[in-house]
Image (cartoon, helix red, strand yellow):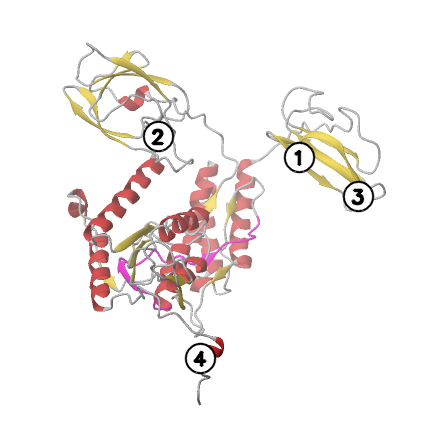
């Protein structure tokens, strides 16, 4: 049973079919293969209740098949010291990384790279590696010779540098009369518990047009930087002095709690803006669905936006900047399906229900760009392969290999060797280093974006309306005449 950061481990005995509390304060545990010993880690550092000794985590080994252990029993002395020669360790990691690529890469030809030659060439730089970050850079350069995506080099025994989390208010500002003036406040929308908007919370009296005159009592004027004053304030209360004019006369004080990162708020605002643009340009005929990735957040976004707009005649599926995740066959299956028939509706407007009931049955347009990759490559590839609709935008990134089970380094770092690549039913490799090209190539130029125009989105809407006009959605608006069954009708003749 869980309890905060630790849990209570119960022992279930078959002879009396009862579960009893065995040890508490458990953060992690394992049982020996023969079932006789239990090793567990306690975050509190003490015996059965995790409180026998203060300090950091403690590790215990106790008998798993005997009486409940006493508090503090079986504690291990894990105070270990090791002398490490960094240069020798760097050398060992370098060669292990090279071997892992050789032994674990998804194809044996190393994409045509002369891998022994690469080892000889890059090992000459080993004497100049003076820091673990240097080694990661060297491994990255060597791994790049394979020309493959998902070949991540990360981690390692790198000293931790204390860093403060800068606070952000989730707002845009302009400088006016030497003061910071709020021009936009990003809200989290009332439905979303995963986003918190510092200036749009309940009871927070902050408005667009307000001037931020001081932070925690320190007056704020240009050329000083607002974010200097917010440094280290994430998730801590901050008192802002505000006024509707650039003067301390009549100013008010408001307590807010900055967030560490407001990117989620800005992304949600961008998505909602796009949805309103599509709704306006299509006069309510087309849905807009954004897919940030092909993991759980992407599926959540799809389910929320797609099925809530099933009254629309067509859909714009926007997967730009898609971060990937898994193969989004569920999304593709839903987009591809058609309805088979109807069930009549005896209530309200009496519009028959389609079967299946949930879906958008008209044209589908998917927007792609060069910043969508991995699962964000495969999804438009499947969309195109199954002839679901039209792709608009730019060619996707081109990284479709999966990663798994590459051993880590001795210091906790890793160099990933992709373990599986994608090939088509005609036995040809595809997507990796290729991407998925659009049917209609549209570039989003900075000057257009700065002027408020999303050419890719606008072109997608135009194409959706064009296809809708050419092939309107055919759907029954009323049920057929009531049927007659039994002896009241003549049997059909052959």
Alpha carbon separation for disc pair 1 and 2: 34 Å
Alpha carbon separation for disc pair 4 and 3: 74 Å
Q: First in sequence: mark 1 or mark 2?
A: 1
On the image, the x and y values in percent for residue 412 come to: 55, 40
Q: Quadrant of the C terminus?
A: bottom left
Alpha carbon separation for disc pair 3 and 1: 21 Å
The residue depicted at 19 percent of the width and 45 percent of the height is 449
Q: Which residue is mark 2?
A: 197
Q: Which residue is mark 4?
A: 489
Is residue 414 in sight in this rendering?
yes
Q: Which residue is mark 1?
A: 1
Is residue 367 in sight in this rendering?
no
Residue 463 included in the magenta stretch of the image: no
Q: Residues within 10 Å of mark 2 (few under 14, many from 20)?
A: many
Alpha carbon separation for disc pair 2 and 3: 51 Å
For residue 93, above or below residue 313: above
Instruction: Report the disc number at residue 168.
Output: none
The residue depicted at 74 percent of the width and 41 percent of the height is 31
In magenta, the rendered stretch is 386-407
Q: Which residue is mark 3?
A: 35
Q: First in sequence: mark 4 or mark 1?
A: 1
On the image, the x and y values in percent for residue 48 come to: 74, 26
The residue depicted at 19 percent of the width and 58 percent of the height is 462
Q: First in sequence: mark 4 or mark 3?
A: 3
């Amino acid at each position: 049973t869980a309890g905060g950061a630790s849990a209570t481990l119960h022992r279930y005995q078959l002879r009396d079919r009862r579960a009893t509390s065995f040890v508490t304060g458990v953060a992690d545990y394992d049982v020996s293969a023969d079932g006789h010993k239990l090793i567990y880690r306690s975050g509190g550092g003490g015996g059965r209740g995790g409180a026998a000794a203060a300090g950091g985590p403690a590790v215990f080994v106790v008998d798993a098949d005997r009486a409940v252990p006493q508090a503090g029993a079986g504690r291990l002395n894990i105070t270990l010291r090791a002398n490490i020669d960094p240069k020798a360790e760097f050398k060992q990691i370098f060669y292990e990384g090279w071997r892992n690529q050789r032994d674990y890469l998804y194809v044996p030809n190393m994409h045509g790279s002369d891998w022994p030659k690469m080892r000889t060439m890059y090992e000459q730089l080993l004497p100049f590696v003076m820091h673990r970050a240097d080694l990661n850079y060297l491994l990255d350069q060597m791994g790049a010779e394979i020309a493959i995506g998902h070949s991540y080099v990360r981690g390692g025994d790198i000293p931790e540098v204390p860093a403060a989390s800068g606070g952000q208010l989730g707002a845009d500002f302009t400088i006016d009369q030497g003061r910071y003036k709020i021009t936009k406040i990003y809200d989290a929308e009332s439905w979303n518990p995963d986003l918190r908007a510092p200036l749009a919370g309940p009871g927070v009296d902050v408005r667009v047009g307000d001037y931020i005159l001081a932070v925690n009592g320190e007056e704020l004027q240009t050329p000083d930087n607002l974010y200097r004053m917010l440094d280290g304030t994430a998730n801590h209360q901050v008192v802002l002095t505000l006024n509707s004019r650039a003067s301390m006369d009549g100013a008010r004080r408001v307590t807010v709690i900055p967030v560490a990162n407001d990117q989620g708020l800005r992304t949600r605002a961008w998505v909602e803006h796009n949805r309103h643009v599509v709704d306006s340009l299509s006069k309510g005929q087309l849905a807009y669905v954004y897919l940030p990735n092909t993991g759980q957040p992407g599926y959540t976004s799809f389910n929320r936006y797609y099925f809530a707009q099933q009254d629309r005649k067509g859909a714009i599926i926007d997967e730009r900047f898609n971060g990937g995740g898994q193969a989004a066959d569920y999304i593709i299956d839903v987009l591809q399906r058609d309805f088979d028939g109807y069930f009549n509706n005896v209530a309200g407007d009496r519009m028959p229900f389609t079967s299946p009931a949930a879906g958008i049955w008209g044209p589908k347009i998917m927007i792609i760009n060069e910043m969508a990759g991995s699962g964000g490559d495969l999804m438009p590839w499947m969309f195109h392969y199954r002839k679901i609709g039209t792709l608009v935008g730019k060619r996707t990134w081109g990284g479709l290999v999966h990663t798994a089970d590459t051993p880590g380094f001795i210091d906790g770092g890793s160099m990933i060797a992709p373990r599986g690549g994608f090939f088509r039913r005609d036995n040809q490799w595809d997507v990796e280093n290729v991407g998925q090209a659009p049917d209609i190539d549209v570039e989003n130029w900075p000057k257009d974006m700065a002027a408020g125009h999303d050419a890719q989105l606008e072109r997608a809407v135009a194409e959706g309306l064009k296809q809708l006009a050419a092939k309107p959605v055919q759907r029954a608006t009323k049920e057929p005449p009531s049927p007659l069954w039994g002896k009241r009708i003549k049997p059909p003749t052959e």
